[in-house]
Image (cartoon, helix red, strand yellow):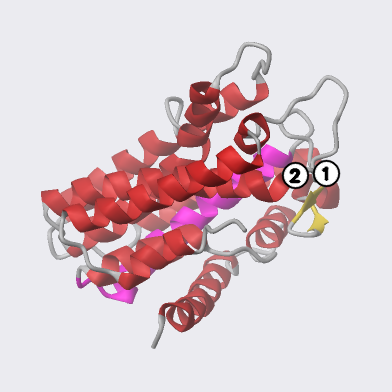
Amino acid sequence: MDAKEYLIRKKKNIDRALSLFLDEGSSPVYEAMRYAVLNGGKRFRPLLLISSGEYFGATEDLLMPYACSIEFIHSYSLIHDDLPMMDNDDFRRGKPSCHKKFGEALALLAGDALLSLAFEVIANSPLPESGPQIKSLIIGELARAIGPSGMIEGQWRDITFNPQKANQTDYQEIALKKTANLIRVSALIGARLAGAGLPALNSLEQYGTYLGLAFQLWDDLQDLGLDKPQPDFFRPNLAQYLGKDKASKLLSELREKARRSLKSAGINSNLLEYFADQLKFE
């Protein structure tokens, strides 16, 4: 089975698991949660977690709750990101964003609920063979990646961004905290659950960081010319800052750095390399 077929099959399994976790309630909050999570999506992060974990020998049954938690966190971040006081997006994946469908108050609560559910799912998940300390380590690592020094800081930098004073480092710092952190920790969690050694974990940390930066730049390139200017609002876009040609060159460099990070620890995974291959821009 090639990488594409493998990921298609795994994505179906992830979608089924997400639906099962979200079937527990019938309140308006749960309805909004289901709308946000089950309304399409590439499942890039949970697929990365499962791919990393299975490479090192973990089972899908062990990995799946953590993969779903990552997707719940990602979905929470998108709900909040779309709100009028943030990025003010009316559409997500071609459909009305959560706050346009359910109102701002319910969308805000749905995002909060998904964040809480993510950690509940991890808390109730099976213990890895390496013991409960690994679960505690993962919870701490994940919380730091999305907390006040991670994703939250990235969002704050995003909404307070001043393009007149910014340089490339400022753009990439937002990408690192807002996007790359969750992708990095997705690659790490799978390997940790499988009991991977320190050299492999260090390699995957670098791989996940470069992959996350590449993902955001690839997304910025896709958005070139599509974002409609809004009065008194600026959306940071590194590809727009650099120009298409320079951004495409940087994207290729980041993808290659991600691949080399894997090789540095002897991780010969066509599947993990495939995640970088998907981020081509032509």
From the viewer's side, name the closer residue of 64 and 197: 197
Screen quadrant of the N terminus: bottom left
Q: Position of residue 101 (x, y in %)?
A: 83, 52
Q: Position of residue 28 (x, y in %)?
A: 74, 55
Q: Position of residue 81 (x, y in %)?
A: 67, 38
Question: Which amino acid type is marked by label 1?
Answer: Gly
From the viewer's side, name the closer residue of 73 and 161: 161
Instruction: Report the magenta residues as a range.
Output: 57-82
From the viewer's side, name the closer residue of 197 and 212: 212
Residue 86 badge: none
Chief secondary structure of the magenta portion: helix
User: In the image, what residue occupies the spot 53% across and 79% down?
Assistant: 12
Judged from this view, the residue extending furthest toward the bottom is: 1
Residue 103 badge: 1
Secondary structure found at label 2 = helix
Q: Position of residue 266 (x, y in %)?
A: 16, 61
